[in-house]
Amino acid sequence: MPRLPLAGSVGQVSALPAAGPHPAPDEDQVLYQVSQAVLAVNKELSVRDVLQVIVRSARSLSGARYAALGVPDAHGSFAEFVVDGLTARQQRAIGPLPRQHGMLAVLLKEGKPERLADIRTDPRFGGWWPSAHPDLADFLGVPIKDGADVLGIIFVANKTVPGGFTGRDERLLGLFAAHAAIALINARLYERVGELSVMEERARLARELHDAVSQKLFSIRAKARAASVLADRDPARAAAEMDSVAALSGEAHAELRAVISGLAPPELGEHGLAESLRRYAALAGMVQGVKVRFCASDIPALGAGRDAAAYRIAQEALHNALRHSGARQIEISLHRAGRRVVLEVTDDGRGFSPDAPAPGLGLASMRERAAAAGSSLSIESAPDSGTRVTLALPVESGGRP
């Protein structure tokens, strides 16, 4: 959805047509719209979706022509600016996001409500807005606060019935500001938890890498130096040292792989399984110069563990197809089939016998991951017939399509 300012004041908007004059809402309507805002805060919606519900409800209940909610950034503008009451064409015509000036700056700095009969006559108003911006008159703005901290602002403008905004409107807007504060605080806490999780994961990884690998790498370096010194005067001992280097290298590689395999792909939490696989497939295909087609339908939530297993198995299958099969085309599909989500990776490459030893292809690792995730894995292939890897992951009870 495009961003846009409303009067030295407004940014992102819904494309709903403006409402005409209407009587004050009855108590049932007030209760319903407030409850919708509360439910929005508690649902698994994006912060922007929650703020949009709040702004739309605030405009409706206060009988305003326009409403907006802004969350400031550190650069004199707004990180979020959600608006209700403008059409899509009006949004495009107004232009970029507003700056923190005029009455917006007053609300952010002073942190108290402002109810004005005509914003244009207030000396604190900057006296300017873009030519395509609607003319604002009566104005009601309330800060969104966490204790003494101002998190943002919410305001309504141009009452659609005579008399301007009332004390009741101010109390209602304050109620919506409180819900907006809850949404913003939750978002900040979630972000902080994510940061802490990343830090903890980095610390864990550093410990595991040190414990598992660093000592072997030190030994490899020492033995390689010894072999270099002994190469001329004692070739047999030098060869023995090099054999030891090879063995230690293999152990270090195995332990490093074990550490890495325990890591959940970081993009899964942000983008989800389907989008993460799409991005990886596009990148891997581009790097290898092979056409990789990806298709997915709506799938229910699988849980972090199964998402990670599916992602890693798809990675391994795609890697095998790109590096070992000589395929000209590869396809990854993700879809729901009854109570299962099915992942398939197919290629038109040279194929192989799944029952024959295939060192380096990672088939055992794929089967182990599938078993650990409570899923079934099948690998269909034959020489000169391509390969199909199919993973079927059970959907938890209650999973939605």
Image: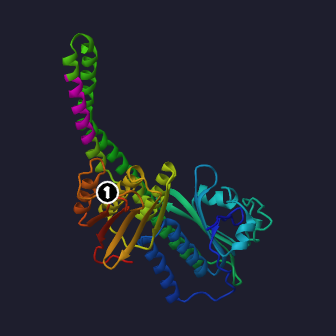
Whether the magenta-drawn stretch holds residue 81 is answered as no
Location of residue 236 (image quadrant): top left
**Mark 1: few/some/many CA within 10 Å (<14, 14-19, 20+):** some
Q: Nearer the viewer, residue 8 or 323?
A: 323
Looking at the image, which residue is at 26% across and 62% down? Answer: 370
Determine whether 45 is above or below 196 in the image: below
Determine whether 232 is above or below 53 in the image: above
In the image, the segment drawn in magenta is: 240-255
Q: Nearer the viewer, residue 350 or 179?
A: 350
Look at label 1 and name its amino acid: Phe
Scheme of image coloration: rainbow
* Callout 1: SS: loop
Q: Is residue 322 left or right of residue 376?
A: right
Q: Is residue 165 left or right of residue 383?
A: right
Looking at the image, which residue is at 61% across and 60% down? Answer: 107
Residue closest to the far right = 131
Question: Looking at the rendering, in which quadrant would you find the C terminus?
Answer: bottom left
Q: In the image, residue 184 lies at what x, y percent? A: 48, 62
Q: Is residue 252 left or right of residue 351?
A: left
Looking at the image, which residue is at 31% across and 59% down? Answer: 309
Q: Is residue 26 visible?
A: yes
Q: In the image, residue 220 lies at what x, y percent? A: 26, 27
Location of residue 377 (image quadrant): bottom left
Residue behind mark 1:
352
Question: Looking at the rendering, in which quadrant would you find the N terminus?
Answer: bottom right
Q: In the image, residue 378 lies at what x, y percent? A: 28, 65
